Image: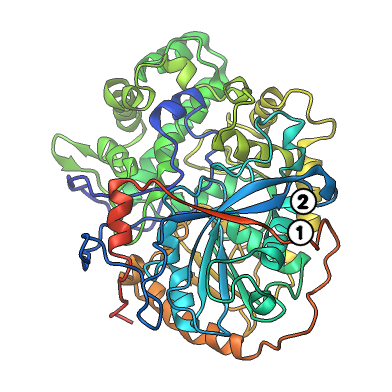
Amino acid sequence: MGGGNTSFRVPKVSALIVVFLGLLSVASAARNGLVGGRKQHMVDLYRSITPKPGPNGKRPVTDVNGNIIADYDVIYTFDQLIDHSNPSAGTFKQRYYHTWEYYKTGGPIVLTTPGEQTADDTFALLTNASMSGFIAQATNGAVINLEHRFYGKSMPFADMSVKSLQVHTVEQAIEDLVYFAQNVQLAMPGGKTDAVRPHKIPWILLGGSYSGALTSWTLNQKPGVFWAGYSSSGVIQPQLDFWQYFKPIQKNMPANCSADVEAAIQVVDSVIDSGNATAYAELLALFGFAPDLAPSNFANSLTYPISDWQILDVYSSRGSVFFDFCDALEVQAGQPAPASGFGAQTAITAWGRYYRTSYVDDICKGFDPEECMSFDGSTSSSIKPTDDRSWMWQVCNQLGWAQVGPPADYKGVVSKHFTVDNYTTYCNTAFDGAFTDTFESRVEATAKKYLGWGTKADRLFVVNGERDPWLEVTHSAEEARLASTSTTPIFLTDGYHCSDLTALNTVSKSIADVYQSARTTFPAWMKDFKASDKPVATTAGGTSSKGRNAAGRAHASPFAAAIIAGAAFVLAVL
């Protein structure tokens, strides 16, 4: 099933200054099977925007009246309940960024979360260079970027033991959002009064990827607390066997590259299927691996450059190892392959040479290649808090999304020898003794509880990208066939994963159209809001005590500072 694009010759491009928040470091990758199950990312890809400097070289943040207010990079903390079903368990400090740059009395609060990553340096989500800031500007609202529990420094406990992780669930995360909205005391004018509570002014919940799903799930579980939502690439359908992750990649990658990867994978699978130890050892040697690398680990290692597709974006579509990989396969002696590719033998020889001479060394950086390429849960078994272990707990405990090989009768770009059983073993090793039921039953229970494709959420603005590998667990999945309505508009752009969350991608007409629609839809929905005397009743946890707040300044990297300085980006194209 080759992609429909024309064959290509990958140009050599200089490195661009691109931030991919949440991307694993190379060293971490080497210790954790590269991507630990291909951790999802809330994709915040920004280029440095030419700043309009103030006296100190950085434009000060001002409110609608021209008054200087707190910078974007101020970190506030909220006393969040550790366990919403048992408020007596105490609280932990949950971090957030906050601005009221565009706020006018009665305007909404836009609440977003970076999801499965630290909130460090994600304050650009407050600005109109992002969808959250853009909606705030269009509705005269304020913005909050709240760190998810068990990520960054928002830690209920000092460790990530199985015991501690019992309160790391979708249910607790939803309750965090509700409790925060109903109790936080904000630095903005009137922020310490009931005037900014969700029963007095509308709150908009926004997220991308996992946090996009969390938006849909929260609107389903807690109707009336959040008046509206925005879900970008929201992975709303928990699913264990998620081999479809690779389908959008296979469909949209250059035709010659997909043809040759498919052909090479057929060779790999046939050698493994044969049981011929000599032939398998020769195949491993071609890629620079020792003969004792397990077939499942070898199969998984071959997915690495392909899954790098996930970090592509519309405005910078060459910013990925993916195209270096295709270039290695599809350009021989300076000549590009035809759309049909060079064929299996040439492709697998080139693939092996690429791994043997550069790719594996670049990825593993001094680690033993066999250890580096092993999908082994023991590498995630330390109880020391890390974002990787936190995410894998969510995957193993509730969400699934095992990106594995396709069914035997499907000609794919991934080997069928990387399976759900490998994920199950990983989970049982990483979280020893945690699970007494089956992986499948846990994921099915999550899908049933939070409705998945059966979502009933109203005033939920949904955006997906047709080139997003996560597409088949979103609202736009072929299997779901969810219809776009006036209360749940569903947009399918030509973007990748969460491409609509950064305004830089409005170079795409389909994404520019999304921004145009958001600018009219959200103000219209806000007009329908009616304040009430009492907050919406919720079923879990504490509802009485008000969160106490503190503020401190975040450490911003030089590049993050450039983002802040340019946060006054105006969408002139719209």
Q: Is residue 26 left or right of residue 316?
A: right
Residue topped by disc 2: 446
Specify whether residue 6 is in view.
no
Alpha carbon separation for disc pair 2 and 1: 6 Å
On the image, the x and y values in percent for residue 265 come to 46, 33
Pick whichever, 378 or 493, lies toward us.
Answer: 378
Q: How is the image coloured?
A: rainbow
Residue 299 vs 558, above or below: the answer is above
Disc 1 residue type (three-letter): Tyr
Q: Which residue is mark 1?
A: 450
Residue 336 located left or right of residue 273: left
Residue shown at 44% from the left, 56% from the top? 74
- Which residue is located at x 27 percent, y 39 percent? 324
Return the residue nearer the eye: 250 or 145. Answer: 145
Q: Residues within 10 Å of mark 1 (few under 14, many from 20)?
A: many
- State whether residue 570 is above or below residue 338: below
Q: Is residue 309 left or right of residue 166?
A: left
Q: Residue 26 at x, y = what percent?
A: 39, 30
Quarter of the image for residue 407 reads top right
Would you say the residues marked 2 and 1 are in contact, meaning their CB atoms lie under 8 Å apart? yes
Query: Element at badge 2?
Result: helix
Residue for point 29% across, 27% down: 354
Callout 2 amino acid: Thr
Category of crowding for the residue at label 2, using alpha-carbon neighbours closer than 10 angstroms: few (below 14), some (14–19), many (at least 20): many
Screen quadrant of the C terminus: bottom left
Residue 324 lies left or right of residue 88; in this view the side is left
